[in-house]
Image (cartoon, helix red, strand yellow):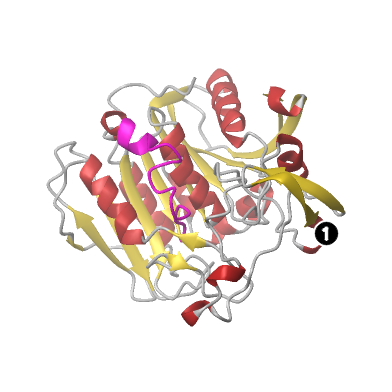
């Protein structure tokens, strides 16, 4: 389905796409799950692939959730241009045709040249690391938000989410205290970004093998610190594969050949959420009765004064893998069904 989003900074309107998976009964109020795909993906691709193989779609149907899967944009330029940004006001040559990473989500880091490996970093353990090249998508070129670390569109994905939520609220009878959000990889990074930009909207967050870029764990201007009271109404759970070389759970530089970004350590992210909810600093084992493989193990920061939960689940695997037997979906909906916001969601 299509929706038109106003983007005055880019001089007009943008048509965006999303997929809706409706439950058998539309009798409301319905809980809503927004799910964001990874880099290079699409809403239809995740609806037919990821949501099925992980059990998320089946669990959404079984729990009478409306599940909506938006699509990111790929507006790369297949040509060489002069690109401008905060760190290159005089412009540099951007060879876009060699570095198209496909569709993705804007997490507010366009033009920041401190989030990736550059030539001066190629020493010690990073001497064989991939150095990024200037490659700027057309929206970033137009907005002068280009930089060596750019890897996605600069379209206003936050405006897209707000417009989509308003449209869905007008179309369906939604329970505005039960809107949930999650995503895998870049979609999970966007989930982190939404926690910073829309602190009064979601009942819980679920990023999967996804971390904020280094320097963005609390938002570009410390939004999570400023909005802790609002975020205390939102529970947090995350899954991560232990052997991830693209977004490593320990943070720092990606070690996968061809990937060149720095990430916040997973434990630092989880501890921040534990602080927001005033939970125990030391997590304890969380024993779930769902079948799982790949040494699936969850821990919980208990005793949260907010009465919410902060949970981390790890499993053996590489970036893009997931535990078999439906552990993803079963754990997610066990978690979602425990929480709602005390106040209805807002997103203006």
Instruction: Identify the residue at horizontal 62%, vertical 47% (top origin).
Output: 87
Q: In this view, does 342 lie to the left or right of 191?
A: left
- Residue 46 or residue 87, whichever sits in front: 87
Residue located farthest toward the front when viewing the structure as drawn: 90
Residue 117 point in image, percent of width and height? 56, 66
Residue 132 point in image, percent of width and height? 65, 65
Instruction: Identify the residue at horizontal 66%, vertical 44% (top origin).
Output: 72
What residue does disc 1 label? 97
Position of 292 relative to 63 (above/below):
below
Instruction: Determine if residue 186 is in view.
Output: yes
Instruction: Identify the residue at horizontal 53%, vertical 37% (top origin).
Output: 24
Instruction: Determine if residue 1 is in view.
Output: no
Magenta segment boundaries in residue numbering: 209-226
- Residue 254 or residue 50, whichever sits in front: 254
- Magenta stretch: dominant SS? loop
Q: Is residue 209 left or right of residue 80?
A: left
Residue 272 point in image, percent of width and height? 28, 48
- Residue 163 or residue 254, whichever sits in front: 254
Position of 256 relative to 226 (above/below):
below
Residue located farthest toward the right when viewing the structure as drawn: 79
Name the secondary structure under disc 1: helix
Quarter occupied by the N terminus? top right
Circle 1 crowding by C-alpha within 10 Å: few under 14, some 14–19, many from 20: some
Residue 320 point in image, percent of width and height? 54, 67
Instruction: Identify the residue at horizontal 15%, vertical 51% (top origin).
Output: 302
| Number of marks present in the image shown | 1
Q: Is residue 90 left or right of residue 319?
A: right
Magenta-drawn stretch contains 38: no
Instruction: Name which quarter of the figure residue 313 lies in.
Output: bottom left
């Amino acid at each position: 389905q299509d929706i038109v989003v106003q983007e005055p900074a880019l001089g007009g309107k943008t048509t965006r796409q999303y997929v809706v998976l409706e439950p058998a009964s539309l009798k409301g109020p319905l809980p809503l799950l927004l799910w964001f795909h990874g880099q290079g993906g699409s809403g239809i691709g995740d609806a037919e692939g990821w949501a099925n193989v992980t059990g998320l779609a089946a669990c959404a149907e079984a729990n009478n959730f409306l599940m909506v899967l938006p699509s990111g944009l790929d507006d790369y330029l297949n040509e060489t241009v002069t690109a401008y940004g905060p760190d290159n006001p005089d412009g540099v040559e951007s060879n876009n045709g060699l570095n198209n990473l496909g569709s993705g989500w804007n997490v507010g880091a366009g033009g920041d040249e401190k989030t990736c490996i550059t030539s001066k970093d190629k020493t010690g353990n990073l001497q064989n690391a991939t150095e990024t090249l200037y490659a700027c998508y057309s929206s970033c070129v137009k907005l002068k938000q280009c930089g060596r670390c750019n890897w996605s569109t600069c379209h206003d994905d936050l405006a897209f989410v707000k417009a989509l939520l308003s449209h869905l609220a007008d179309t369906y009878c939604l329970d505005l205290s039960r809107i949930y959000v999650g995503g895998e990889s870049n979609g999970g990074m966007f989930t982190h970004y939404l926690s910073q930009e829309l602190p009064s909207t979601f009942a819980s967050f679920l990023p999967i093998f996804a971390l904020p870029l280094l320097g963005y764990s609390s938002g570009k201007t410390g939004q999570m610190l400023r909005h802790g009271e609002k975020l205390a109404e939102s529970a947090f759970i995350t899954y991560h594969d232990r052997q991830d070389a693209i977004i490593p759970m320990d943070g720092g530089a990606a070690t996968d050949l061809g990937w060149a970004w720095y990430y916040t350590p997973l434990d630092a992210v989880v501890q921040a959420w534990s602080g927001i909810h005033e939970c125990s600093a030391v997590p304890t084992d969380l024993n779930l009765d769902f079948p799982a493989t790949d040494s699936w193990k969850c821990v919980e920061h208990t005793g949260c004064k907010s009465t919410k939960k902060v949970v981390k689940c790890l499993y053996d695997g590489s970036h893009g893998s997931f535990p078999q037997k439906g552990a993803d979906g079963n754990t997610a909906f066990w978690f979602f069904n425990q929480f709602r916001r005390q106040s209805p969601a807002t997103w203006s």
